[in-house]
Image (cartoon, coloured by chain):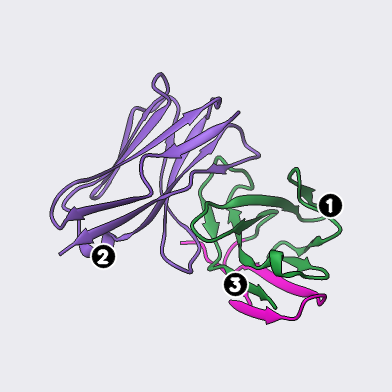
């Protein structure tokens, strides 16, 4: 069966460190992979999209990698800040007409 | 960036009543909108795809007679939960991509918290 797993339900790190979140998938061949941030009681906010032929993408303090051989994406936040505390969701788009979300990782950055 | 709004942000209703949730794209036209449901500590589950000018497409296991979707215009989609029951209590979120497909950035609404007593 198809599955999207994010490494842990919760991750605590110290302010200033780099947070690394993992998204593993099975039985998908996604053309695109997206990362979103969701705050409690709010809808997700788009962060980054990476295509299957791209290895890495960056945006300010964010970096995403996409390894289609390992079927894995890593999401990094460098110089983390307490304001980065939120739930981060990965989402796969196997095609143009569907998007599947992982269960999310709740990140807490400790001052 | 593009903005998607939802109304109401929360609603409490009695079992057996119907509830309508609106999703609007405020500064762009959305030929396609998507409706999700999210239970506590779970991820978003796609319920249906709302298409302007045609019938909605429902995901497997979602009752189309219970969750009525109407894409009335290029900026408005509504989800009506008919004869709501406590198990329908959830967080309902809509999204709209600029290009109409999942290969584009999805802009999400703020969500609607439905509680059925």
Of residue B106 and residue B29, the one placed in the foreground of this image is: B106
Question: Callout 3: residue from which chain?
Answer: B
- Give the image location of residue B31, x and y in percent: 70, 54
Give the alpha-carbon distance from disc 2 to disc 3, as whole Å: 24 Å
Of residue B7 and residue B54, the one placed in the foreground of this image is: B7
Q: Residue furthest right?
A: B65
Q: What residue is pinned by disc 1?
A: B55
Tell me the SS state at disc 1.
loop
Chain identifier, purple in the render: A
Tell me the SS state at disc 3.
strand
Residue A83, numbered circle = 2
Tell me the SS state at disc 2.
helix
- The boundaries of the magenta stretch are B1-28
Question: Pointers 2 and 1 in contact (CB under 8 A)?
Answer: no
Front position among marks 1 and 3: 3
Classify 10 Å Cα crowding around label 1: few (below 14), some (14-19), many (20 and above). Answer: few
Compared with residue A104, is residue B40 higher up or lower down, i.e. above or below?
Answer: below
Give the alpha-carbon distance from disc 2 to disc 1, as whole Å: 41 Å
Of residue A74 and residue A1, the one placed in the foreground of this image is: A1
Q: What residue is pinned by disc 3?
A: B113
Q: Residue furthest top?
A: A69
- Give the image location of residue A71, x and y in percent: 43, 25
Chain identifier, green in the render: B
Residue B76 visible in the displayed image: no
Give the alpha-carbon distance from disc 1 to disc 3, as whole Å: 25 Å
Indicate the quadrant where residue B19 lies. Answer: bottom right
- Give the image location of residue A24, x and y in percent: 42, 32
């Amino acid at each position: 069966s198809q599955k999207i797993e994010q490494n842990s339900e919760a991750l605590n790190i110290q302010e200033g460190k780099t947070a690394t979140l993992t998204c593993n998938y099975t039985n998908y061949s996604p053309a695109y992979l997206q990362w979103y941030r969701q705050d409690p009681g709010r809808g997700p906010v788009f962060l980054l999209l990476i295509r299957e032929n791209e290895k890495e993408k960056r945006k300010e303090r964010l970096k995403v990698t996409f390894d289609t051989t390992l079927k894995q994406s890593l999401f990094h936040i460098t110089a983390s800040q307490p304001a980065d505390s939120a739930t981060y969701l990965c989402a796969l788009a196997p095609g143009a007409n569907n998007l599947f979300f992982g269960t999310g990782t709740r990140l807490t950055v400790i001052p | 960036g593009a903005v998607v709004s939802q109304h109401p942000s929360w609603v409490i209703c009695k079992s057996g009543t119907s509830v309508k949730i609106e999703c609007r794209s405020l500064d762009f036209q959305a030929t396609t909108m998507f409706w999700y449901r999210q239970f506590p500590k779970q991820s978003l589950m796609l319920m249906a795809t709302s298409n302007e000018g045609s019938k909605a497409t429902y995901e497997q296991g979602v009752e189309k007679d219970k969750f009525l979707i109407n894409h009335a215009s290029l900026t408005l989609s509504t989800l009506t939960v008919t004869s709501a029951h406590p198990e329908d209590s959830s967080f309902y979120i809509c999204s709209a991509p600029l290009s109409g497909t999942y290969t584009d950035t999805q802009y999400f609404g703020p969500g609607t918290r439905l509680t059925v007593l």
